[in-house]
């Protein structure tokens, strides 16, 4: 008869049966106590008190990093037992096993039991017990068995030896059930081999599982610690032989376990939520609630973080997308949609990966969309530098780019600004061609950068100060924060503007000036490979505070000033264009002709000359133009060329949009972006832009200003308490960072005090929040991750992908994107992925097949976090042409 039905039995006369049954039961108890030498009343009492003292309710929660918070000191091993005759009984570890009445009546007859499993490279280990090789399972079984014995004996002492129960029949039944449960528990412990929830057994010690994103705690996760340029695995990790543990779920209370043989199957079929700690409720709290408290497997995320993880169904709120703004890209996406959607999971499974090296004439410097030789050969003309623009392969490559034979970890910033390892970028053509101009020199194993350039032979800082002396209103690091350097060379201008707290997007084509952008990136300076040819640059309109061009040989004045008008689109109203080319200060016939044309063009564009000077040290001159802050000059022009753009021409549409020789009007509505200058730096980084109002719906569904503030607080918490302290990343080795799917730039803002710079990428099908990122004094770029990024291999130290891969699946496969990540990331660089569990598992399979080191995986419900390190491994086979 079921245990919980005992109160409904017909009571037999006391004298006829109860005495006999009680006598037999007491005999069984006496024999059992005599056979257990370790069980004495004093020990039972101490054990019972210790169990009660140790049992506490633990708050298992997860913040937006999807790591779990646990008080490691309060982990209590739970015991599950099978009930006889099909009864579904789960013992509460906080109570003695014999206290059946308390479990049945005080708690509604239910208790919690949660299994825990850890997944490592060798498979799944149930119960969370990782045993060091050579240690048998008998020790663990003994521990479990002892726990059951103590619990049961304590309960028997209270019910049996106490013997003053009013109903003798109930007492005898309780004793029989306790004995039966004790036997079943012992058999179960022996079969399962010491499953103590919440602990990892390593030798003779117990390792508590603790994941605390707020406090930076990551106990229980095998983290790899960086030690200079070497990577060492922690001692505990080595003992457990698990470089990365995937923490598996603690399910909700087990509803039924009818036999020991069914336990493993039940554990494997539990929900996809991940847990890292055993959660229990105290007896007092249960009584207050009138029964047992039903705890979910995973507690809901804190309000802000929960909403941040769930974007609106439209995924853009009041923001449009770059794909919608760019008509050509919209058509291209429509054509892709007709081909049907394929799940990226088809590419999963390490056994199916057969990696080969790319067979390209670019070798170790291969950029798929810039080195597409087949597409370049088909071009009808190259007079507008079409051959330097993006021409991506129809199918993204899945080959791997080889590394230079003697590649080594880059020199750390700020020393890297002055010198880099020669073998990392083994190119000397630029040193030979521009050595006399202090661009770059070869010095033994290093390439050195004296800090000069064509226009500032005596150092970039001298030149930077010269600009501010010519126009104090520039105010580097206050009014002027975000700069575009066109024709940047090796980017020394941008590299030294860091000393003035100014961020520079350096831009140059992959051309005969060999590896100039690659030099910049290796130095730790922001740069992209791009050319001003026939299409708009991948930035929104009205975002750069200053645009700079030092002797960049761009023909600004030809074809109606089309290229200078593109700069006008990018320059913020009231922003400055600094030009220090030879036409400014030389009197050669060609220079005079160009100067005259530039004067006419800039006057027709309503640009005002606000500064002009000539340096006596470098013997160069520069001129500074200001873009108008209103439309008054446009309306007064007698000459209507260049013309104003049609109202339908969106200045923010930038992805695959052909250049036009027209000017966009300056926003004159005070509520619109561009109608006034942003806050001064650094105040602007944490303040919502004035043009975000509460009538607009943000990406996460809140009013836009609240969305912005929530995003900032979210990433401050994640970065400060987890990324910087809880993931085993040596941030001294990190300089170049990319946020592959930035929203408001909160991740970059949270890293502001670090010695890093962040390239914020806004994908073309995401809400177009890139103007927000620029408004707060950060920078970024539009990109479609179904194509290759315009940068050299081995450019970045850390890539961050938050909810990126799952959103790409409807349009492209995940595998080529991870291959692109492998191309862009430096050896020993880190990848952090936050996404749904299925997608993270898929990413993990691919990076493992690439011989990456998976340093940590944590999942909770359907959300997961992965941290992996790229290694120096490369395949030996080269793909066929």
Image (spheres, grey):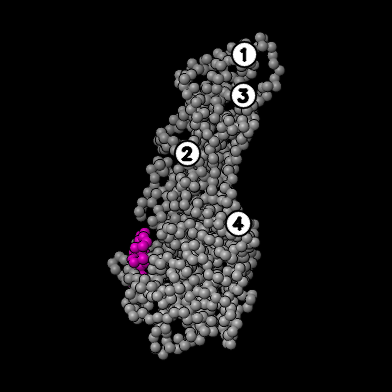
Looking at the rendering, the stretch of residues picked out in magenta corresponds to 407-431
Precedes in sequence: disc 4 or disc 3: 3
Precedes in sequence: disc 4 or disc 1: 1
Judge by depth and name the residue closer to the eye, 94 or 348: 94
SS for callout 1? helix
Q: Measured along the vertical axis of the image, is residue 445 above or below residue 163?
A: below
Q: Residue furthest bottom?
A: 589
Q: Measured along the vertical axis of the image, is residue 610 above or below residue 703?
A: below
Q: Measured along the vertical axis of the image, is residue 844 above or below residue 398?
A: above
Q: Residue at x 60, y 74 (%)?
A: 668
SS for callout 2? helix
Precedes in sequence: disc 3 or disc 2: 2
The answer to if 409 sits in the magenta stretch is yes
Disc 3 + disc 2, Cβ < 8 Å: no
Disc 4 + disc 2, Cβ < 8 Å: no
Residue 357 visible (yes or no): no
Judge by depth and name the residue closer to the eye, 98 or 838: 98
SS for callout 4? loop
Snapshot quadrant of residue 786? bottom right
SS for callout 3? helix
Q: Of circles 2 and 1, which is in front?
A: 2
The answer to if 476 sits in the magenta stretch is no
Q: Of circles 4 and 1, which is in front?
A: 4
Q: Which residue position is annotated with label 3?
A: 101
Q: Which mark is residue 72?
A: 2
Q: CA distance from mark 4 to mark 1?
A: 67 Å
Q: Of circles 4 and 3, which is in front?
A: 4
Q: Which residue position is annotated with label 4?
A: 700
Q: CA distance from mark 4 to mark 2?
A: 33 Å
Q: CA distance from mark 2 to mark 1?
A: 46 Å
Q: Which mark is residue 21?
A: 1
């Amino acid at each position: 008869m079921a245990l919980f039905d005992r109160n409904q039995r017909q009571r037999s006369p006391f004298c006829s049966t109860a005495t006999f049954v009680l006598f037999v039961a007491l005999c069984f108890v006496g024999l059992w106590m005599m056979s257990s030498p370790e069980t004495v009343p004093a020990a039972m009492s101490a054990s019972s008190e210790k169990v009660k003292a140790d049992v506490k309710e633990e708050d298992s929660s997860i913040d937006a990093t999807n790591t779990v918070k646990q008080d490691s000191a309060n982990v209590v091993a739970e015991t599950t037992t099978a009930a006889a005759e099909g009864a579904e009984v789960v013992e509460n570890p906080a109570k003695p096993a014999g206290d059946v009445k308390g479990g049945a009546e005080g708690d509604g007859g239910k208790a919690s039991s949660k299994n825990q499993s850890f997944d490592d490279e060798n498979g799944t280990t149930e119960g969370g017990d990782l045993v060091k090789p050579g240690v048998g399972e008998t020790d663990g079984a003994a521990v479990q068995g002892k726990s059951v014995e103590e619990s049961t004996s304590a309960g028997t002492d209270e019910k049996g030896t106490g013997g003053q129960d009013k109903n003798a029949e109930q007492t005898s039944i309780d004793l029989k059930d306790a004995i039966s449960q004790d036997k079943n528990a012992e058999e179960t412990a022996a079969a399962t081999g010491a499953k103590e929830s919440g602990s990892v057994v390593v030798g003779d010690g117990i390792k508590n599982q603790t994941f605390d994103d707020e406090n930076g705690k990551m106990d229980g996760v095998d983290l790899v610690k960086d030690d200079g340029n070497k990577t060492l695995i922690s001692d505990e990790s080595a003992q457990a032989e698990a470089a990365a543990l995937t923490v598996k779920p603690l399910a909700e209370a087990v509803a039924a376990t009818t036999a020991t043989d069914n336990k493993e199957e039940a554990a494997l079929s539990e929900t996809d939520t991940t847990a890292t700690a055993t959660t229990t409720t105290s007896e007092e709290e249960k009584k207050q609630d009138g029964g047992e408290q039903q705890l979910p497997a995973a507690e809901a995320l804190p309000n802000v973080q929960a909403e941040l993880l769930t974007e609106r169904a439209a995924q853009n709120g009041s923001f449009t997308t770059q794909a919608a703004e760019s008509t050509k890209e919209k058509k291209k996406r429509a054509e892709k949609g007709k081909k049907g959607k394929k799940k990226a999971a088809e590419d999963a499974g390490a056994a199916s990966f057969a990696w080969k090296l790319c067979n390209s004439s670019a070798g170790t410097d291969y950029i798929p969309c810039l080195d597409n030789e087949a597409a370049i050969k088909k071009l009808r003309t190259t007079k507008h530098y079409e051959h330097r623009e993006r021409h991506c392969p129809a199918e993204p490559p899945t080959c791997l780019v080889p590394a230079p034979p003697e590649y080594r970890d880059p020199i750390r910033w700020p020393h890297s600004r002055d010198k880099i390892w020669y073998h990392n970028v083994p190119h000397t053509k630029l040193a030979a061609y521009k050595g006399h101009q202090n661009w770059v020199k070869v010095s033994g194993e290093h390439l050195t950068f004296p800090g000069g350039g064509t226009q500032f032979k005596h150092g970039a800082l001298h030149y930077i100060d010269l600009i501010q002396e010519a126009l104090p209103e520039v105010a580097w690091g206050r009014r002027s924060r975000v700069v575009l350097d066109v024709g940047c060379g090796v980017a020394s201008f941008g590299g030294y503007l860091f000393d003035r707290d100014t961020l520079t997007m350096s831009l140059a084509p992959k051309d005969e000036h060999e590896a100039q952008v690659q030099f910049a990136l290796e130095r730790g300076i922001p740069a992209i490979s791009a050319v001003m040819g026939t299409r708009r640059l991948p930035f929104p309109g009205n975002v750069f505070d200053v645009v700079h061009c030092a002797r960049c040989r761009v023909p600004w004045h030809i074809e109606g000033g089309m290229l200078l008008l593109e700069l006008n689109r990018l320059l913020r109203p009231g922003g400055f264009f600094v030009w220090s080319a030879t036409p400014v200060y030389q009197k050669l016939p060609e220079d005079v002709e160009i100067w005259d044309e530039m004067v006419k063009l800039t006057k027709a564009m309503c640009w005002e000359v606000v500064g002009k000077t000539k340096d006596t040290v470098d013997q160069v001159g520069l001129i500074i133009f200001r873009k108008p802050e209103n439309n008054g000059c446009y309306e007064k022009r007698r000459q209507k060329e260049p013309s104003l753009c049609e109202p339908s021409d969106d200045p923010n549409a930038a992805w695959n949009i052909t250049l036009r020789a027209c000017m966009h009007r300056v926003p004159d509505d005070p509520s619109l972006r561009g109608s006034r200058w942003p806050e001064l730096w650094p105040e602007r980084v944490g303040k919502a832009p004035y043009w975000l109002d509460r009538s607009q719906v943000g990406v996460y569904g809140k009013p836009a200003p609240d969305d912005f503030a929530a995003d900032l607080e979210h990433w401050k918490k994640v970065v400060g308490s987890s990324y910087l302290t809880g993931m085993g990343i040596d941030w001294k080795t990190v300089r170049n960072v990319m946020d592959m799917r930035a929203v408001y730039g909160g991740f970059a803002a949270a890293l502001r005090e670090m010695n890093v710079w962040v390239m914020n990428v806004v994908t073309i099908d995401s809400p177009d929040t890139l103007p927000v990122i620029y408004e707060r004094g950060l920078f970024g770029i539009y990109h479609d991750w179904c194509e290759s990024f315009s940068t050299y291999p081995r450019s970045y130290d850390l890539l961050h992908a938050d909810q990126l891969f799952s959103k790409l699946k409807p349009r492209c496969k995940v595998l080529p994107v991870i291959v692109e990540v492998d191309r862009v990331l430096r050896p020993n660089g880190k990848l952090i992925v936050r996404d749904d569990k299925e997608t993270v598992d898929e990413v993990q399979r691919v990076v493992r097949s690439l011989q990456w080191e998976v340093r940590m995986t944590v999942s909770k419900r359907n959300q997961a976090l992965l941290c992996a390190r790229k290694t120096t491994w490369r395949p030996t086979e080269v793909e066929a042409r």
